Amino acid sequence: MVGIIMGSSSDLSVMQDAIDICQSFGVAYEVDIVSAHRTPVKMLQYAQTAKERGVKVIIAGAGGAAHLPGMVASATILPVIGVPVKSSNSIDGWDSVLSILQMPNGVPVATVALNASKNAGILAIQMLAIADEALAHKLETYKQELVEKVAEMSQQTKSNWK
């Protein structure tokens, strides 16, 4: 199972892509609002109990100061993927990117691009697929579909310029 958390309900529009990709791969997930600043006790409880709830990897989206992914990573042994969110109080998203990216040694957080929760979902699925052959096969099919889409775009582009 993938845990998908975010600091505010305003982040849901960005985090929806992670939810959608989990659904499309048939991967179980849970979703919650967990604020590092407004609900620190809940955040610690979430991180410390995730493994016993069956969560294998956590995706944490946060904007602004974006402490949620790092603080969650500090309280669990599970891998955490941070999604920097360009929020209304953000400095063009850079504050979120750097807050998640610049973790101290010993507390790693995998970080995807700004607002890229789809990539976070795919990365989580890749992590799970290490021990799940059926999921690995679905990923291989997905990757092949990407190849085919690019080939189709290439062909269309070439035919438009002839």
Image (spheres, rainbow, N blue to C red):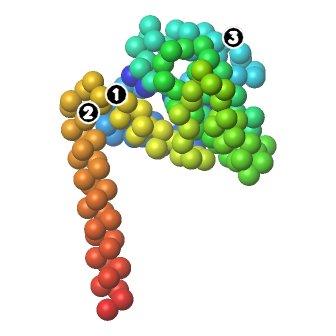
Kindly indicate the quadrant of the structure image that contains residue 161. bottom left
Residue type highlighted by circle 3: Val
Image: 105 above or below 45: below
Q: Is residue 65 visible?
A: yes
| Mark 2 nearby-residue class (10 Å; few <14, some 14–19, many ≥20) | some
Residue highlighted by disc 2: 135
Q: Mark number for residue 51?
A: none
Q: Is residue 7 visible?
A: no
Q: Is residue 32 left or right of residue 51?
A: right
Q: What's the CA distance linking mark 2 and mark 1?
A: 8 Å
Residue highlighted by disc 1: 128
Q: Secondary structure at mark 3?
A: helix
Residue at 71%, 47% in the rendered image: 94
Quarter of the image with the N terminus is top left
Q: Earlier in the sequence, mark 2 or mark 3?
A: 3
Residue at 50%, 15% in the rendered image: 77
Q: Secondary structure at mark 2?
A: helix
Q: What's the CA distance linking mark 2 and mark 3?
A: 34 Å
Kindly indicate the quadrant of the structure image that contains residue 20. top left
Report the front residue among 157 and 98: 98
Nearer to us of marks 2 and 3 is: 2
Residue at 29%, 50% in the rendered image: 143
Q: Position of residue 116 (x, y in %)?
A: 53, 46
Q: Earlier in the sequence, mark 3 or mark 1?
A: 3
Q: Mark number for residue 41?
A: 3
Nearer to us of marks 3 and 1 is: 1
Q: CB under 8 Å between callouts 2 and 1?
A: yes
Q: Secondary structure at mark 1?
A: helix
Q: Position of residue 113 (x, y in %)?
A: 56, 47
Residue type highlighted by circle 2: Leu
